[in-house]
Image (tube, rainbow, N blue to C red):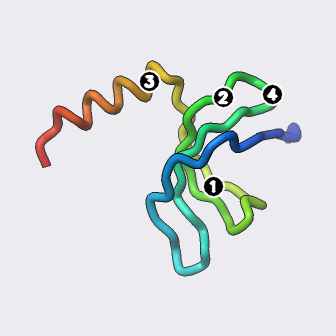
Amino acid sequence: MADIKYEIIETIAILSESPKGWKKELNLISWNGREPKYDLREWAPNHEKMGKGVTLSVEELKVLREVLNNREY
Protein backbone atom coordinates (compact mmCIF):
# COMPACT_ATOMS: atom_id res chain seq x y z
CA MET A 1 0.00 0.00 0.00
CA ALA A 2 1.27 3.47 -0.84
CA ASP A 3 2.38 5.75 1.96
CA ILE A 4 -0.37 8.29 2.65
CA LYS A 5 0.72 11.68 3.89
CA TYR A 6 -1.68 13.99 5.66
CA GLU A 7 -1.69 17.25 7.54
CA ILE A 8 -4.52 18.15 9.88
CA ILE A 9 -5.03 21.83 9.14
CA GLU A 10 -7.84 22.37 11.66
CA THR A 11 -9.82 20.25 14.10
CA ILE A 12 -13.38 21.48 13.76
CA ALA A 13 -15.16 19.14 16.19
CA ILE A 14 -14.69 16.04 18.31
CA LEU A 15 -18.01 14.22 18.11
CA SER A 16 -17.33 11.32 20.47
CA GLU A 17 -14.61 9.35 22.26
CA SER A 18 -14.46 5.60 22.86
CA PRO A 19 -13.27 4.04 26.14
CA LYS A 20 -9.97 3.21 24.39
CA GLY A 21 -9.38 6.87 23.56
CA TRP A 22 -10.26 6.80 19.84
CA LYS A 23 -12.05 10.02 18.84
CA LYS A 24 -14.52 10.61 16.03
CA GLU A 25 -13.44 13.96 14.58
CA LEU A 26 -14.40 16.41 11.88
CA ASN A 27 -11.15 17.89 10.57
CA LEU A 28 -9.90 19.95 7.67
CA ILE A 29 -7.11 17.78 6.20
CA SER A 30 -4.66 18.06 3.34
CA TRP A 31 -4.06 14.59 1.86
CA ASN A 32 -0.77 14.07 -0.02
CA GLY A 33 -0.19 17.82 -0.30
CA ARG A 34 -3.51 18.50 -2.02
CA GLU A 35 -6.10 21.18 -1.29
CA PRO A 36 -7.60 20.59 2.20
CA LYS A 37 -10.96 18.83 2.44
CA TYR A 38 -13.37 18.13 5.27
CA ASP A 39 -12.84 14.71 6.78
CA LEU A 40 -14.91 12.67 9.25
CA ARG A 41 -13.28 9.59 10.81
CA GLU A 42 -12.04 7.99 14.02
CA TRP A 43 -8.50 8.65 15.19
CA ALA A 44 -6.35 6.86 17.74
CA PRO A 45 -4.81 8.98 20.49
CA ASN A 46 -2.12 11.32 19.10
CA HIS A 47 -3.42 10.62 15.56
CA GLU A 48 -0.98 7.72 15.06
CA LYS A 49 -3.70 5.53 13.50
CA MET A 50 -6.95 6.26 11.69
CA GLY A 51 -10.14 4.40 10.92
CA LYS A 52 -12.13 4.43 7.71
CA GLY A 53 -13.82 7.71 7.04
CA VAL A 54 -15.38 10.03 4.51
CA THR A 55 -13.80 13.08 2.88
CA LEU A 56 -15.99 15.91 1.60
CA SER A 57 -15.38 18.94 -0.59
CA VAL A 58 -16.79 22.31 0.48
CA GLU A 59 -19.66 21.84 -1.99
CA GLU A 60 -20.50 18.38 -0.60
CA LEU A 61 -20.36 19.69 2.96
CA LYS A 62 -22.79 22.49 2.06
CA VAL A 63 -25.25 19.96 0.59
CA LEU A 64 -24.96 17.80 3.72
CA ARG A 65 -25.52 20.83 5.97
CA GLU A 66 -28.61 21.82 3.98
CA VAL A 67 -30.05 18.30 4.17
CA LEU A 68 -29.44 18.10 7.93
CA ASN A 69 -30.83 21.59 8.56
CA ASN A 70 -34.07 20.69 6.75
CA ARG A 71 -34.48 17.33 8.46
CA GLU A 72 -36.92 16.89 11.35
CA TYR A 73 -35.61 14.97 14.35
Name the N-terminal-most of marks 4 and 1: 4
Residue of label 3: 60
Residue at x-position 64% and y-position 59%: 43
Specify the farthest residue to the left. Answer: 72
Name the N-terminal-most of marks 1 and 3: 1
Residue at x-position 60% and y-position 74%: 21
Residue at x-position 88% and y-position 40%: 3
Q: Position of residue 7 (x, y in %)?
A: 76, 41
Residue of label 1: 51
Looking at numbered disc 3 in the image, what kind of residue is underneath it?
Answer: Glu
Disc 1, disc 3: CB below 8 Å? no
Looking at numbered disc 1 in the image, what kind of residue is underneath it?
Answer: Gly
Q: Is residue 11 left or right of residue 3?
A: left
Spatial separation of the CA atoms under disc 3 and disc 2: 13 Å
Image quadrant holding the N terminus, namely: top right
Q: Which of label 3 and label 2 is nearer to you? A: 2
Task: Kindly state the secondary structure of the residue where label 4 is placed.
Answer: loop
Q: Position of residue 32 (x, y in %)?
A: 80, 31
Residue of label 4: 33
Name the N-terminal-most of marks 1 and 2: 2
Disc 4, disc 3: CB below 8 Å? no
Q: Quadrant of residue 60?
A: top left
Q: Position of residue 24 (x, y in %)?
A: 52, 58
Q: Is residue 30 left or right of residue 25?
A: right
Spatial separation of the CA atoms under disc 4 and disc 2: 8 Å
Q: Is residue 1 left or right of residue 41?
A: right
Spatial separation of the CA atoms under disc 4 and disc 3: 20 Å
